[in-house]
Image (cartoon, grey):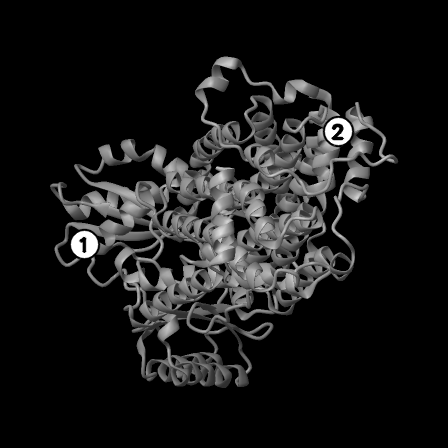
Amino acid sequence: MATLLYHLGRAAFRWRWFVTLLWVAVLGAVGFAATKAPAAPDDGFTMPGIESQKAFDLLEQRFPGTAADGASARIVFVAPNGEKVTATENKAAIEKLVTEAADGSQVASAVDPFTAKAVSKDASTAYSTVTFKVKADDLTDSAKTHLERAIDTARDAGLTVEVGGDALATQPAAGGSAEAIGIAIAAVVLLITFGSLAAAGLPLLTAIIGVAISMSGVLALGSTFGLSETTGTLATMLGLACGIDYALFVVSRYREERAKGHAPREAAGLAAGTAGSAVVFAGLTVVIALAGLSVVGIPMLTKMGLAAAGAVLLSVLICLTLVPAVLGFWPNAVLSRRDRKKKPKRGNGENGGSRWARIVVRRPIPVLLLGVVGLGAMALPALNLQLGMPGDEAKSTATTERRAYDDLAEGFGPGFNGPLTIVVDAKKAGDAKTAVATISKEIAATDGVVSVSPTRFNSAGDTAVFSATPATSPTDEKTKQLVQTIRDERSGIESQASGASFEVTGTTALNIDVAQKVQDALIPYLALVVGLAIVLLLLVFRSLLVPLKAALGFLLSVLAALGAVVAVFQEGHLASWLGVDQTGPIMSLMPIFLVGIVFGLAMDYEVFLVSRMREAYVHGDGPGQAVVSGFRHSARVVVAAALIMMAVFSGFIGAGASMIKMIGFGLAIAVLFDAFVVRMAIVPAVLSLLGNKAWYLPSWLDRILPRMDVEGEALSRKIPDPVADTPTPHLTPVP
């Protein structure tokens, strides 16, 4: 592997014009294809295999047009203190709004709350649903302005009017200025790490080129494979993250080889053969984690994972070819000013990384205990993890959507915002109406159900639908128990319904089912990605214990990160510091995203850091000295890579949406735990305690496994250092 990549790096350096123009041509061709490709169809969010999805599909089949995805606005009216919405003036203002709203150019219908009985028992609150013919993204500004003017007129009459739904909902920015600050911090970290503008800019440039190609590819293939810009969100994030990381390590190794006295082309080849080998295996671990998302069974998540895996593979190819080619144009520009002025010398002096490693190697047990106990304590809140899909209740009270949610909950009860939809299939029933009435009566009598709506039959008379309003809010654990109770009692209810059957769906039930399916898939997903990664790391490090240690360290860091997310976003600790307005369940897909993304990045740091330790061990260092050598060469770059990722992810904490805040915080804190606690403290402590056993591999397994030579052992025999390997007198040997 190392020899092959060495020749590839030398060739890319030599034929730099050809390699660069080839990548420019690829970018141009894929970009042109993206501009000409038809837009991908919006398949929406589907979850095959769960009851709520089956019921929704049946509803769409038996009630053509019912499942239309046009935009809607739920307008909530609250009368002034002591008054009622049924008072003459208030009623007239509401009816005027409904009439004006119905005249909108894209409006399909506007429901009068007084004829639809959409008035609370105390007559303090009422609501009207305005449905549009098009999706929210297709609404014209004039259509929105028309509705907003009608709402303002009602407010002028003295009513409190709030609007829920997606028609007038504002889409919060992903990160705003905080995200820009994060990217700026990343650039500063690169500049400090390298001391050169060219060296800092090269990883950013090549990463951006990789992201541009991958996103253009997603758009070009969108109509064929059902991909969209949303599908490419994860590809953009990881393509940028891994692209910067991989180029960072190759450029750093190039500078190191130049410091040893190697010529530019030779240094580029050696960097590709050593750091490039680590890049290949680090990239493969990320691909495994992303491709493994397909086991969850969510089509959208599968597409996102595969698209991101393609982006990471592209980042690896660019790192191995375009980075050496660009180095060929400016071989000295990436060196620091000090290195350009000084004579080449072997850079094996002490630095912050080696000094820290010596501290850990001399006191491994206290460091190990402190790291494990600390992360274990952070992981404890994860035991109370409650999955769900936060809605308007998680938004800021400054938004009209949140105020509309609160007004409806106060006027009609907390369960009104999340009714359960019951779909009854009476095709095999002898008397459909009687069967449906029986089912409705039994569900209405279930503890936890406040009321049920009148049933509505389709034109064929063989399918009916009605709503059941829970006594508790959509995200309440009691609502989840209610859904389970209704389903558990299904066989008894259906036995009284003479051949009719029913299923429970609706947004609340769908969120509950999605959370359960994701929770059930989490263990198989973890087993798959960790198992395959252990096999891959076994090939890289030729050790039994190092891959196991890497996997266990990752599990510890990801559980601690999940515990921190639960502590902030579910339990509310320090929530105000992050601008979290309302605590609630953790987004259903959050654990899967956290595991997949952080696993890939964690294995990146593991491969780059431990491969240098393995390289030193193979070249004759003792176990303790190998740890110090690995830290001397890699710690600074790994720290820089981790700081860059934390800066980028932290930018999402400044987002307006709670879910985006959650993702940004979770990823940033996970990188913090994994890079600085696990890789920088626990890993060297464990390796120093294990000693030579850390690198033990049974002889029979050693004969079976193919030799990857990530450490570049073959290269070191073939290409000796220009500078003699003279030990530095002031270094204290580590036993």
Q: Which residue is mark 2?
A: 625
Per the image, label 1 sits on a secondary structure element best described as: helix
Residue 158's x, y, as percent?
55, 82
Q: Give left or right: position of 307 versus 43.
A: right
Q: Give left or right: position of 566 versus 100.
A: right
Residue sitting nearer the eye, 688 or 327 = 327
Label 1 sits on what residue type?
Arg
Residue 219's x, y, as percent?
35, 64
Label 2 sits on what residue type?
Gln
Eyeballing the image, is 235 above or below 364?
A: below
Task: Say if mark 2 contacts mark 1, CB within 8 Å.
Answer: no
Number of on-image labels:
2
Mark nearer the viewer, 2 or 1: 2
Question: CA separation, marks 2 and 1?
Answer: 72 Å
Mark 2 closeness class: few <14, some 14–19, many ≥20 residues within 10 Å = many
Residue sitting nearer the eye, 611 or 501 = 611
Residue at image location 71% in from the left, 27% down from the top: 621
Q: Which residue is mark 1?
A: 62
Residue 460's x, y, as percent?
12, 55
Residue 582 picture quarter = bottom right
Q: Which mark is residue 98?
A: none
Asked if residue 46 shows in the view, the reply is yes
Residue 333 picture quarter = bottom right
Per the image, label 2 sits on a secondary structure element best described as: helix
Residue sitting nearer the eye, 167 or 601 = 601
Residue 152's x, y, as percent?
50, 84
Asked if residue 581 shows in the view, the reply is no
Indicate the quadrant containing the C terminus: top left, top right, bottom left or bottom right. Answer: top right
The numbered mark, 2 or 1, whose residue comes first in the sequence reads 1
Residue sitting nearer the eye, 222 or 406 = 222
